[in-house]
Amino acid sequence: MGDSRRLQAVAGDVGRPTTGDAAGWERCRGGARVSDAARLTRPTDKKEKITFSFGRNWQEYLDRYLTPEHEAFAVASLKEFLELESLEGLSFLDVGCGSGLFSLSAHRLGARSIVSVDVDSFSVRCCEQLRERAGHPQNWQALHGSALDAEFMARLEPADIVYAWGSLHHTGDMWQAIRNVAACVKAGGLFWISIYNHVTGRESSKSWLRIKRFYNRSSRAVKFLMELAFYTRHGILPSLLQFQNPVRFIRNYPKSRGMTLWVDTKDWLGGYPYEFARPEEILRFCRREFGMELINLRTTQTTGGNEFLFRKRGVQ
């Protein structure tokens, strides 16, 4: 894709959406086995170097970029995909909370209780910072913990909405993380996840896996050059080639989820471990393992994230 959707998808947002076809995806039976995908994408060297901190990147976002307008965009994105105008009376569990922006959005929408979880201590601090801005609400807590820690996750109270957007594919064991987090959904509750798409051919998922490994092994100077190249290639050049103003694209970028182009660029390049799956693999996994029903879907043809909204069968 040569337009703005290409950059948003590659940098961690969704690409070209496919909506209103949940039933069609439920009927899908194609794709590789889950075990094949896990073997292809999971880091094989336990000593592999990881130098990128999501939390430090999110701290820069809070310090330099977050505005009330960005908050409004995030709130709108929650309402749109959940198809809810309010979260009043509902509990919200945010796994891999990152900046804490979407926990804050749940608070703005009136959630009865909010629990924010992240394995990165800097992300937990970011979330606490936003909680402070919101006036220290007693119904919102930020916790340090891992989606791979089954005992920790089991201690959390099941929630009406479990939100894990773009986090579980960075755990190093995505399928187990999905299992642990899905167990936190109440009967009748909603499970919203975004997982990187499995792409073959040019700019494939496997090629990005190699790039991410190289980025994490590189010096700060090399990292900056890679960031600048990505920012130019996917953010500025497409606009210029279409005789459009790249400044307008950069200014409009936050409208999708409240994020910014530069922060998302570093998030994409540095985000490792890195796993991915085809939409049908996620659908089949969640249906067979948890008996979940797909109620909303947004997919991409790029390496960006496919978004899934499931409902757990049962009555609360």
Image (cartoon, rainbow, N blue to C red):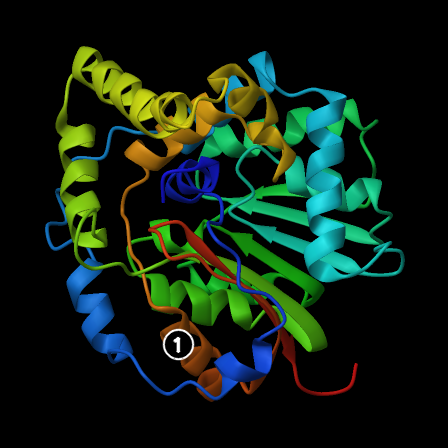
Nearer the observer, 14 or 107: 14
Horizontal side, residue 50 vs residue 128: left or right: left
- Horizontal and vertical percent position of residue 17: 53, 57
Q: Is residue 39 above or below residue 14?
A: below
Residue 313 appears in which quarter of the rendering? Answer: bottom right
Horizontal side, residue 273 vs residue 145: left or right: left
- Horizontal and vertical percent position of residue 25: 49, 79
Q: Is residue 220 above or below residue 102?
A: above
In the rendered image, the quadrant that contains the N terminus is: top left
Which residue is depicted at the point 36% across and 39% down? 2
What amino acid is at disc 1? Glu
Which residue is depicted at the point 48% across and 53% down? 16
Nearer the observer, 99 or 197: 197
Nearer the observer, 10 or 277: 10
Residue 150 appears in which quarter of the rendering? Answer: bottom left
Q: Is residue 297 above or below residue 47?
A: below
Horizontal side, residue 305 vs residue 84: left or right: left
Horizontal side, residue 270 vs residue 17: left or right: left
Which residue is depicted at the point 88% across and 60% down? 89
Residue 138 appears in which quarter of the rendering? Answer: top right
Which residue is depicted at the point 72% across and 60% down? 82
Q: Residues within 10 Å of mark 1 (few under 14, many from 20)?
A: some
Q: Is residue 157 above or below residue 143?
A: below
Classify mark 1: helix, strand or loop.
helix
In the rendered image, the quadrant that contains the C terminus is: bottom right
Q: Which residue is mark 1?
A: 280
- Horizontal and vertical percent position of residue 189: 71, 73
- Exactly how many numbered labels are in the figure? 1
- Horizontal and vertical percent position of residue 35: 23, 76
